[in-house]
């Protein structure tokens, strides 16, 4: 809350869900009260379709502490009017281990500035990934674990940067290797999956049992847009653990360890609305890949899973 620069008398809403865990309800209210904020707790029936009756409270807030990880677009709309949002859903162990520091913002913004200046992104890996996209037409976003600026949406505690590629530009091959991660399944891949990218879409999914499963998942939606390439980027978190999924019940965690793992490459599928595009899709896969190299206009950002730029490495 201090990194999110909560001020005395600032209007803060803590958002809970009627059927949800609301894990940090009491501690958030206590901490915010102690900081002198004008804090209230709003509990909604469905956080992904927030009832109109709750919107005046959210709209009046300067900061929303979202204990539900709401995917309602109204949250981003309120962000355009200045609402800061901080999602907090991970377990206490993960929050404590990956606790953000103020310097994380500069690291993430350095990566974001590199992406904004680039025209191409190329990704390779020893497993066989080699693809390229064009950049510049759509935007991206980033998270550094706190929300200190008007309009900024973030989630504690992970850090990463992503962008959207120009529509129809992705060409090449992505190999999701054994040991890489699939979200929202929260599963490690056991058998490599080869994706053939053509004109911004997955044209073929090849491999063994995990390829069959991925294809079945995407085919189930009967919508070609679920095969599109979505946001792309790399992880910048401190103290994340690639093996975390092995140590928590799936329902207990969101996946900040894998999604934001330092030096991962985050491939994803489906929509590009969050980058200012027009593509809607009913399914979105986040797929962190280990050991990749990421190049912007030929300049390495990540080499074999190591973040290269000193300005982006945690101190
Ligand atoms: Fe995603």
Image (cartoon, rainbow, N blue to C red):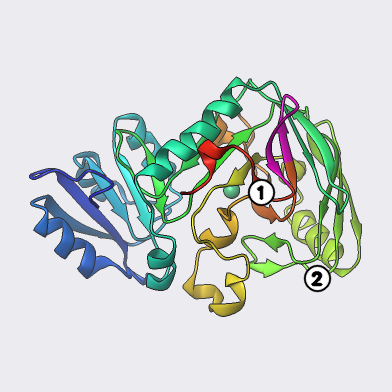
Name the one closer to the observer, 237 or 303: 303
Q: Which label lies toward us, 1 or 2?
A: 1
Residue 73, labelled with which disc?
Answer: none
Tell me which residue sits at (29%, 40%) in the image: 148
In the rendered view, would you say 49 is above or below 150?
below
Question: What is the crowding at mark 2: few (fewer than 14 residues within 10 Å), some, or many (at least 20)?
Answer: some
Residue 306, labelled with which disc?
Answer: 1
In the rendered view, would you say 195 is above or below 21?
above
| Residue 7 point in image, percent of width and height | 14, 43
Contact check, label 1 and label 2, Cβ < 8 Å: no
Tell me which residue sits at (42%, 44%) in the image: 104
Name the one closer to the observer, 170 or 223: 170
| Residue 114 point in image, percent of width and height | 58, 27
Q: Is mark 1 within 8 Å of ligand 1?
A: no
- Residue behind mark 2: 190
Side (left or right) of 69 relative to 22: right
Side (left or right) of 223 relative to 231: right
Residue 234's quadrant in the figure?
top right
Label located before the other in sequence (1 or 2): 2
- Label 1 and label 2: CA atoms lie apart by 23 Å
Tell me which residue sits at (22%, 62%) in the image: 28
Q: Secondary structure at mark 1?
A: strand
Q: Is residue 181 magenta?
A: no
Name the one closer to the observer, 56 or 276: 276
In the rendered view, would you say 253 is above or below 127?
below
| Residue 281 point in image, percent of width and height | 65, 43
Q: Secondary structure at mark 2?
A: loop
Q: Is residue 296 magenta?
A: yes
Tell me which residue sits at (84%, 46%) in the image: 129
Side (left or right) of 300 relative to 307: right
The magenta stretch is: 294-303
């Amino acid at each position: 809350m201090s990194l999110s620069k909560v001020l005395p008398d600032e209007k803060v809403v803590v958002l809970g869900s009627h059927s949800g865990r609301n894990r940090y309800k009491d501690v958030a209210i206590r901490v915010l009260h102690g900081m002198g904020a004008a804090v209230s707790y709003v509990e909604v029936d469905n956080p992904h379709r927030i009832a109109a009756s709750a919107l005046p409270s959210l709209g009046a807030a300067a900061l929303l502490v979202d204990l539900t990880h709401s995917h309602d677009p109204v949250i981003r709309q309120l962000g355009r009017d200045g609402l800061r949002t901080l999602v907090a859903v991970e377990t206490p162990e993960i929050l404590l281990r990956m606790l953000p520091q103020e310097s994380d913002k500069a690291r993430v913004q350095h990566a974001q500035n590199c992406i904004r200046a680039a025209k191409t992104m190329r990704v390779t890996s020893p497993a066989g990934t080699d693809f390229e996209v064009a950049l510049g037409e759509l935007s991206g976003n980033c998270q550094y674990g706190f929300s200190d600026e008007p309009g900024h949406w973030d989630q504690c505690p992970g850090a990463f940067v992503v962008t959207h590629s120009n529509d129809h530009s992705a060409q090449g091959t992505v190999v999701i290797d054994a040991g890489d991660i699939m979200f929202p399944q929260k599963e490690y891949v056991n058998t490599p999956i080869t994706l053939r990218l053509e004109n911004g879409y997955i044209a073929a999914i090849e491999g063994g049992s995990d390829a069959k499963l991925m294809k079945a998942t995407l085919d189930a939606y009967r919508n070609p847009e679920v095969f599109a390439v979505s946001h792309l980027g790399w992880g910048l978190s401190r103290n994340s653990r690639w093996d975390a999924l092995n140590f928590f019940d799936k329902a207990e965690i969101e996946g900040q360890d894998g999604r934001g793992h330092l030096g991962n490459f985050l491939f994803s599928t489906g929509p590009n609305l969050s980058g200012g595009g027009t593509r809607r899709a009913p399914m979105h896969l986040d797929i962190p890949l280990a050991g990749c190299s990421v190049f912007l206009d030929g300049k390495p950002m990540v080499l074999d899973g190591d973040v290269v730029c000193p300005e982006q490495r945690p101190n």
